[in-house]
Amino acid sequence: MSGLGFGEPRQSETDELIERIVRYCRQRNPESLDRIFDNMRLNRPAMVAIAVALQEDIEALSWFCSYMASETNRSEDNLKSCNPIKTFSGILIKFGMQPFLDFVPYPGARIIISNQEKFKALPETIKVKLEQAFNIQEHSPHQVQKINDALMQELMA
């Protein structure tokens, strides 16, 4: 019989759920994530916790961003030769931007940059490549916050 030793804290349901989500991200299993997220209200702290748990695995973290942006909906989508949101997310992560804090992936294959300072600090060659590959629209910090709040509300509805 396996059990917790005396005085050992038990993992919370949230911690167990995040562990499962991380495992499914590493397995590239969108269908299993769908089953979790169909029964879970999304919130920023949970998304940040998932990103932190995956921070050492940029491939899995950028894949999770593509999943959250609806770029990866089925296991077959993992076979696509081009996943722009995954690629874009991976670049942002490699240059120190944090998903769900500095940028947020949303359904419809969209990413909102919420930390303009970090985005503007990217090397010029990277910014040029990103601007060539994606439709980047600039908004004031106030507009970005309003958009971010509205999209988060939409996700949590």
Image: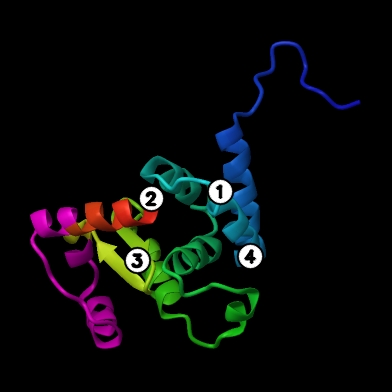
Which residue lies under the disc numbered 3?
A: 92
Residue 29 visible in the snapshot = no
The majority secondary structure of the magenta stretch comes to helix
Label whose residue precedes the other's in the sequence (2 or 1): 1
Which three-letter amino acid code belongs to the residue tagged 2?
A: Met
Please report the residue visible at 50 percent of the width from the left and 62 percent of the height from the top: 64
Q: Which of the pair 36/61 is nearer the observer?
A: 36
Which residue lies under the disc numbered 1?
A: 39
Label whose residue precedes the other's in the sequence (3 or 2): 3
Q: Whole-Å distance between the Cαs marked 4 and 2?
A: 19 Å
Which three-letter amino acid code belongs to the residue tagged 4?
A: Glu
Tell me the SS state at disc 3: helix
Vertical side of 38 occupied by 13: above or below? above
Q: How many residues crowd mark 1 within 10 Å: few (<14), some (14–19), many (20+)?
A: few
Which residue lies under the disc numbered 2?
A: 156
Query: In which quadrant will I find the N terminus?
Result: top right
Tag 2–tag 1 contact (CB < 8 Å): no
- Numbered mark located on residue 31 in the image: 4
The image quadrant that residue 94 belongs to is bottom left
Q: Whole-Å distance between the Cαs marked 3 and 2?
A: 25 Å
Q: In the rendered view, does 21 fall on the left or right side of 122?
A: right
The picture places residue 148, in percent across and down from the top left corner, at 24, 56
Q: How many residues crowd mark 4 within 10 Å: few (<14), some (14–19), many (20+)?
A: some
User: Which segment did they paint magenta?
Assistant: 119-146
